[in-house]
Image (cartoon, grey):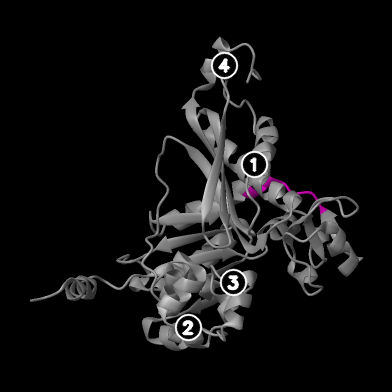
């Protein structure tokens, strides 16, 4: 008799090999600024706050990264590392407009586009016949067409699952492409330092090092029971990625009864000011989407995902809808203050729900009544 595992394998064997592309724009915010203001090109540029205050780096140009400046670093520290740095304020509305241009290019290839943030997205191109059915050719066309439309460079990763495609897009940055085929995956993962796996942060990497685990091969060799004992349910995930097992689907955007935006950080964050910069950015993006749909929201929800991939949400509802993005800042700060901070944070998101139309404001004279 055929058991359940054999049936599952038979089903997988009859399905076409998935083809996943991960597109990641190169130094997106900084590149937009250098595109729009030629005097900034080739200069060490920081998009962020005041270097004499408590601002943080939202983006760093490649010219300043050689000084060790990275996103989420304090602007004060960035100025110390590179006194010649030029600081400009973010223009999030412009970045969102450019992101929509990029998204439109992606949708010319496939409807299965899953945005991760303004500057990166997954595409599932399985079964697409254009470009001779080659995901590599599609990725190169995307990079070329994005440049033609926006004059901005993108890097791409191509593989058979989301995890490997995302890792691949970082290999030949900036303005590069990398492909990890099923035949290459085992040896690639085996040699990969554990710090390169998405989902393994600095704290987890340190604990793995203490267990004698430094590479994908080391991680794969560790019994899953040992990993679960040390990390709980995340231990099974670590074992799965060491085996190259990632069956997560690419989730296309669909209409919902809520509208939101979220972003995953390259490095986990603890600092409140840095987190608020990211939260306000996602709030602005969510509110813009909401406005384009002709809606306002009574309820705002803050989503937090920790470094161990556990997550929580905090919400607040007003009697009248939030009239502007800025009107939500006060409540977002309060919601963040209510969030436990026992672990670093890897993702934040803001969602508006309990939606209504702007016409309802006419029946509610006190916009700020709580």
Q: How many marks?
A: 4
Query: Taking the image as drawn, is residue 118 in sight?
Result: no
Q: Position of residue 119 (x, y in %)?
A: 59, 57
The residue shown at (58%, 73%) is 170
Distance between mark 3 and mark 1 Cα atoms? 25 Å
Looking at the image, is mark 4 or mark 3 nearer the viewer? 3
Direction from residue 353 to residue 193 in the image, left or right = right
Q: Position of residue 259 (x, y in %)?
A: 49, 38
The residue shown at (57%, 16%) is 361
N-terminal label among 2 and 3: 2
- Disc 4 to disc 3: CB gap under 8 Å: no
N-terminal label among 2 and 4: 2
N-terminal label among 4 and 3: 3
The residue shown at (41%, 74%) is 240
What secondary structure is found at the residue carrying circle 4? helix
Looking at the image, is mark 2 or mark 3 nearer the viewer? 3
306 lies above or below 157: above
Distance between mark 2 and mark 3 Cα atoms? 18 Å
Q: Nearer the viewer, residue 147 or 185?
A: 185
| Residue linked to disc 3 | 204
Q: Position of residue 186 (x, y in %)?
A: 42, 86
153 lies above or below 180: above
Q: Residues within 10 Å of mark 3 (few under 14, many from 20)?
A: some
Q: Position of residue 185 (x, y in %)?
A: 42, 83
Q: Residues within 10 Å of mark 4 (few under 14, many from 20)?
A: some
| Residue linked to disc 4 | 361
Point out which mark residue 338 bears. 1
Point out which mark residue 189 bears. 2
């Amino acid at each position: 008799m055929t058991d359940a595992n054999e049936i599952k394998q038979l089903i997988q064997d009859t399905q076409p090999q998935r083809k996943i592309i991960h597109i990641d724009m190169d130094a997106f915010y900084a590149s937009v600024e250098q595109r729009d203001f030629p005097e900034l090109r080739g200069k060490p540029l920081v998009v962020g706050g005041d270097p004499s205050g408590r601002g943080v780096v939202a983006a760093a140009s490649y010219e300043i990264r050689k000084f060790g400046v990275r996103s989420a670093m304090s602007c004060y520290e960035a100025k110390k590392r590179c006194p010649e740095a030029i600081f400009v304020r973010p223009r999030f509305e412009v970045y969102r407009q450019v992101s929509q241009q990029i998204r439109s290019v992606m949708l010319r290839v496939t409807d299965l586009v899953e945005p991760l943030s303004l500057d990166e997205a997954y595409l599932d191109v399985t079964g697409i016949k254009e470009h001779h059915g080659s995901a590599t050719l599609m990725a190169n066309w995307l990079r070329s067409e994005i440049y033609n439309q926006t004059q901005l460079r993108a890097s791409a990763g191509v593989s058979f699952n989301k995890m490997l495609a995302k890792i691949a897009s970082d290999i030949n940055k900036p303005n590069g492409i990398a492909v990890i085929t099923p035949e290459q995956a085992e040896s690639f993962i085996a040699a990969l330092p554990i710090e390169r796996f998405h989902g393994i942060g600095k704290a987890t990497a340190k604990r793995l090092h203490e267990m004698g685990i430094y590479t994908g091969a080391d991680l794969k060799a560790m019994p899953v029971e040992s990993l679960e004992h040390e990390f709980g349910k995340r231990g099974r995930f670590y074992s799965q990625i060491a085996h190259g097992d990632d069956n997560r689907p690419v989730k296309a955007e669909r209409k919902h009864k809520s509208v939101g935006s979220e972003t995953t950080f390259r490095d986990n964050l603890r600092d409140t000011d840095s987190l608020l910069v990211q939260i306000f950015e996602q709030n602005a993006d969510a509110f813009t989407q909401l406005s384009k749909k002709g809606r306002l929201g009574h309820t705002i929800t803050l989503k937090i995902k920790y470094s161990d991939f556990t997550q929580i949400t905090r919400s607040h509802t007003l009697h009248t809808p939030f009239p502007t993005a800025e009107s939500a800042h006060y409540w977002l700060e309060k919601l963040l203050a209510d969030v436990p901070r026992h672990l670093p944070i890897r993702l934040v998101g803001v969602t508006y729900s309990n939606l209504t139309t702007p016409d309802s404001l006419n029946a509610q004279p006190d916009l700020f009544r709580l």
